[in-house]
Amino acid sequence: MNSKDIRGMASVEAAVILPAIFLVVCLIIIGARLYWAKAQLADAVSAGARAASGQCASCVDPRVRQVVESDLATSGSSCRNLKVWTDSADGFVRASASCQIDMTQIGGPRLTLTQTAREKIDSFRSSTCEC
């Protein structure tokens, strides 16, 4: 093979390999952002359930919402359209939250994440309600 036969091969290789490398980098970034957002939401919901486990029944919902919103704001989360709901039956506080993560800026989809945490209700909690 002489030098005339391979002239321009580097350009062809670059044209094939560079988009593939770019795609892999984008997938890694999307995966990392998704993992980070899911971890932040899980931590916030867990903190909300833990904080509400010592509250009286009428204070559970507002306490969980307050803690989840505060925790997500403090961590700099990219969660949007946050929805929080609770259930305090059977001696446990179950806190759940869902939010949307917008990854369209980097070519990804808009995803909805949902996390649930469960904590045993404190049997020694105060009998007076002060939310």
Image: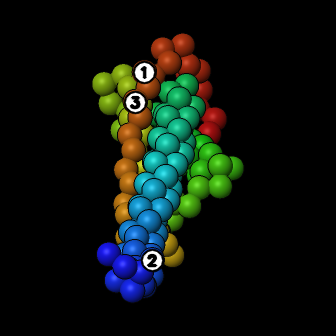
Percent across and percent down for residue 85 are 40, 48
Q: Which residue is mark 3?
A: 118
**Secondary structure of residue under mark 3:** strand
* Marker disc for residue 10: 2
Q: Residue furthest front?
A: 2
Q: Residue furthest top?
A: 124
Amino acid residing under circle 1: Lys
Above or below for 89 versus 105: above
Amino acid residing under circle 3: Arg
* Marker disc for residue 120: 1
Percent across and percent down for residue 9 are 40, 79
Tag 3 and tag 2, C-beta contact below 8 Å: no
Going from the N terminus, do you reach mark 1 or mark 2 first? 2
Going from the N terminus, do you reach mark 3 or mark 2 first? 2
Q: Quadrant of residue 104?
A: bottom left
Above or below for 112 versus 60: below
Crowd around label 1: few <14 · some 14–19 · many ≥20 (10 Å): some
**Secondary structure of residue under mark 2:** helix
* Marker disc for residue 7: none
Give the left or right position of residue 10, taking residue 54 as reference. left
What is the spatial separation of the Cα atoms under label 1 and label 2, in whole angstroms? 64 Å
Amino acid residing under circle 2: Ala
Q: Does any portion of residue 99 appear in the rendered image?
A: no
Residue at 34%, 83% in the rendered image: 5
- How is the rendered protein coloured? rainbow
Percent across and percent down for residue 31 are 43, 54
